[in-house]
Amino acid sequence: MSTTRRELLAALAGLAAAGPRRALAARGAPPSAKPFSPRVGYAAITWNGNDRQAIADIAAVGFHGIQLRASVLQEFEEKPAELRRLLDEAQIKLLCFSSGSVDAAPEKQREYVDTHARHAKFVARVGGPFIQLISNRPKDRAPTAEEYARLGALLNEIGRRALDEGVRLVYHNHMHAFSETPEEVARVLDHSDPRYLSLLLDVAHYRQGGGDPAAGLRAHRERLAVVHLKDVVSPLPGATDAGRYSYQFVELGRGKVDVPAAVQALKDIGYGGDVIVELDAPPEPGKTAKDCAILNKAYVTEKLGLAL
């Protein structure tokens, strides 16, 4: 029986998603034989759609990897080679692409598959390895078992289509999504196929949802493909609601996430993927996105001891 291109890509992606521990074990070497030295990138979300400025600033600060958002499609969807040249000139690699969000509405499934398959094709032409998706939680209630099953099937199909382009789909745990709590993160993964879907674990969203990021990284090591290093304060000063929805993202080291413990967990599991620093917006008026990136770089290099 001949092997199809999709089957070959799925097999290769499955090996990549399993992480370096399995690869090293196959060679008879212990996990510790490979030093922990992840590629550290920075997310363009802080620049709120000004993607050319984000690329310039991130490069100037000293990061060599970037996560771009679907906002770049407005200028570059028909010109992926131009975006690739822009990144090459800045000496920055596209580490991940934020493709948008999905939900479990049956009438939207085909549109979602076609849209994100098109994005995967674009990312492949720019030279990126991953597209990221988040999910939209039903308003004012938890998702049902049927909705989790439908979401899993949708993610599998998008993941298959992405693999046809040589790009891997990662699911981003997120507040206001199907994956707020640690139990819900596991539920999304349980309803999806590891051949077609890996995990992007965001340590701040995981912490805000009631989880221990270090424990989550260890628990999901076999599905882990990308990590967001991020911090959060909660509840906000003066907030009357001290629940999980009272929060603000801040620069690394300013919030309640034990970022060093999360990085230690990555070392312990032999993680060999990328880490991406993310901050949704400058937390104080008058502070620029580049100001925040400079502060985050200092934390990454001085406190975490990671090289850019």
Image (cartoon, rainbow, N blue to C red):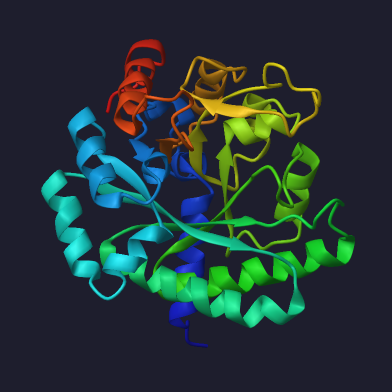
Measured as percent of width and height from the top left, residue 206 is found at 66, 34
Measured as percent of width and height from the top left, residue 161 is found at 51, 76
Measured as percent of width and height from the top left, residue 100 is found at 53, 60
Rendered position, 120 above or below 220: below
Rendered position, 24 above or below 9: above
Of residues 113 and 48, the one nearer the viewer is: 48
Rendered position, 2 above or below 176: below
Which residue, as the protein is rendered here, is positioned at the far left?
A: 89
- Identify the residue at horizontal 47%, vertical 83% (top origin): 4
Question: Is 90 left or right of 47, judged from the image as shown?
Answer: left
Examine the image and state in which quarter residue 101 appears.
bottom right
Q: How many marks?
A: 0
Measured as percent of width and height from the top left, residue 307 is found at 29, 24
Q: Is residue 220 visible?
A: yes
Q: Is residue 8 visible?
A: no
- Identify the residue at horizontal 31%, vertical 24% (top origin): 291
Question: Is 299 left or right of 247, judged from the image as shown?
Answer: left
Question: In what quadrant of the picture does the C terminus appear?
Answer: top left
- Identify the residue at horizontal 85%, vertical 51% (top origin): 140
Examine the image and state in which quarter residue 210 appears.
top right
- Identify the residue at horizontal 71%, vertical 21% (top origin): 235
Of residues 33 and 284, the one nearer the viewer is: 284
Which residue, as the protein is rendered here, is positioned at the far bottom?
A: 1
Rendered position, 190 above or below 182: below
Examine the image and state in which quarter residue 108 appears.
bottom right
Which residue, as the protein is rendered here, is positioned at the far top?
A: 303
